[in-house]
Image (spheres, rainbow, N blue to C red):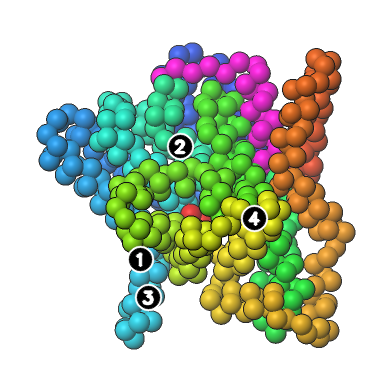
Amino acid sequence: MVFSSLSFICVFLPAVFLLHQVIPGFKGKNALLIVASLLFYAYGEPVYIVLMIISTLFNWLFGLLIGRTDQPGQRKAWVAASVVVNLAFLGVFKYAGMAVGTIDALFGANIPDPGISLPIGISFYTFQAMSYVIDVYRNDVQAQRSYPKVLLYIAFFPQLIAGPIVKYHDVEQQLAQRHADLHDIAAGFRRFCIGLGKKVLVANTMAVAVDSIYAAQLDHINIAVAWIAALAYLMQIYFDFSGYSDMAIGMARMFGFTYQENFKYPYASPSVKVFWRRWHISLSTWFRLYVYFPLGGNRKGRPRTVFNKMMIFFLCGLWHGASWTFVVWGLIHGLFLLIEEYLPIHKLPKPVGVVYTLLVVTVAFVLFRADSFEQGGWIISQMFTGWHFEYACVELAMRQLTPLFIVTFLVAVVAATPAKGALERFVDDAPDNTVAALETASYVFALALLALSLLSLSGGGYNPFIYFRF
């Protein structure tokens, strides 16, 4: 467990920000952020901070070794070694238990579970480290001679444990020199408050219903219960993860760093292909740049293209968790991307395309959330065939449909649409005094979200971000 939300918001973040403002020089500021980031991670992972430091050291050294030679063979050998080392870290600390369980199930072996706990954020910081070394190999960036800068790039606390996955060339200059004026600080703080509100006020409310239903007996789940669980989780995972991304982007801006957007209203997508251009953009971009293109992309014929795309989504599912349910979730998305290449989905009226995409995404997310194939398969089947209304089913459904849940769900549906874009277009055409009033209102709204979020958090309960697991 990392810092409690209240201590992070009320103590850790303000203290680090104020020190960052008063410490002169970028070396001092960077040293502060490194120490703060390591303390942040060590608070909940005192053992695995050693693993992260070893990982960053290895990747820094691989970058230097690649940068110091012009021999193609040596460069290729060093980058291959870096990939092997990084994947070995992931394999041991994330997938050892899955591998043992699979071998036991397939071959009747009796290998004991290694019982290795998952280091928080290992998938995120490992992918960042790999992208740095690969970019040095491709001559997209120069090898960084300073280990502290590489460490700060990978370990910077806003994005350390749940992304977004930041590419080195996007922040290379900011590691050496950056500036955050009053407008940047205020806008970053506003973005942080909005992200916090997404998580605490929306995602956590949806999580109550989701957790209750997924903990229920299977025979208590009918069509109503199944759809409540599926739609609530659809909103929970979006507002949970996009909320964290907003918080990370906002905090980074307060310290002078600029991160790319990670979500662009994916639930308004007219196809699964477009969905993956808008959902977890940093991850889909990473797989496209560092796996899909090196495999040949779509340049080696249709059979190879099909293989490459399915491999990407196999790995994407596996990246999300050490369970075959995640892999199948990824393959479902890959399958529908291939279907869209043969069927004219893009010619459908946009509302029809959006409904189709949401149906695919919603059903797939049931398996993503499920504890087992049995549970996931049962809930999906009940979404379409569960026309039975025993008392236990009705009672379970009604228990979730509280006024708070209904109001929050309706707000979430509106907030998940590109309504913000329409508002921004309205602001662009509005008089200056109207723009100033709306700007002020947005900060008042952000402060209200912060106050409500703190009140909710003070009530107790621990609700970690979903993507902390990855």
Which residue is pictured at 53% across the width and 27% down the height?
258
Looking at the picture, does residue 213 appear above or below residue 164? below
Q: In the rendered structure, which disc, 2 or 3, sits on the residue that comes first in sequence?
A: 3
Q: Nearer the viewer, residue 158 or 47?
A: 158
Residue count near mark 3 (Cα–Cα under 10 Å), binned few <14, some 14–19, many ≥20: some
Look at label 3 and name its amino acid.
Answer: Thr
Residue furthest right as drawn: 403
Query: In 3D space, how far apart are the residues under numbered discs 4 and 2 (Cα atoms)?
Result: 35 Å
Look at label 4 and name its amino acid.
Answer: Leu
Residue count near mark 4 (Cα–Cα under 10 Å), binned few <14, some 14–19, many ≥20: few
Per the image, the residue denoted by label 3 is 102
Give the image location of residue 155, x and y in percent. Answer: 43, 37
Give the image location of residue 244, x and y in percent. Answer: 60, 44
Query: In 3D space, how far apart are the residues under numbered discs 1 and 4 (Cα atoms)?
Result: 44 Å
Q: Nearer the viewer, residue 92 or 266?
A: 266
Query: In 3D space, how far apart are the residues under numbered discs 3 and 1 (Cα atoms)?
Result: 10 Å
SS for callout 2: loop
Q: In the rendered structure, which disc, 3 or 1, sits on the residue that comes first in sequence?
A: 1
Which residue is pictured at 25% across the width and 52% down the height?
84
Per the image, the residue denoted by label 2 is 166
Q: Is residue 123 left or right of residue 449?
A: left
Q: Is residue 1 left or right of residue 238?
A: left
Per the image, the residue denoted by label 1 is 96
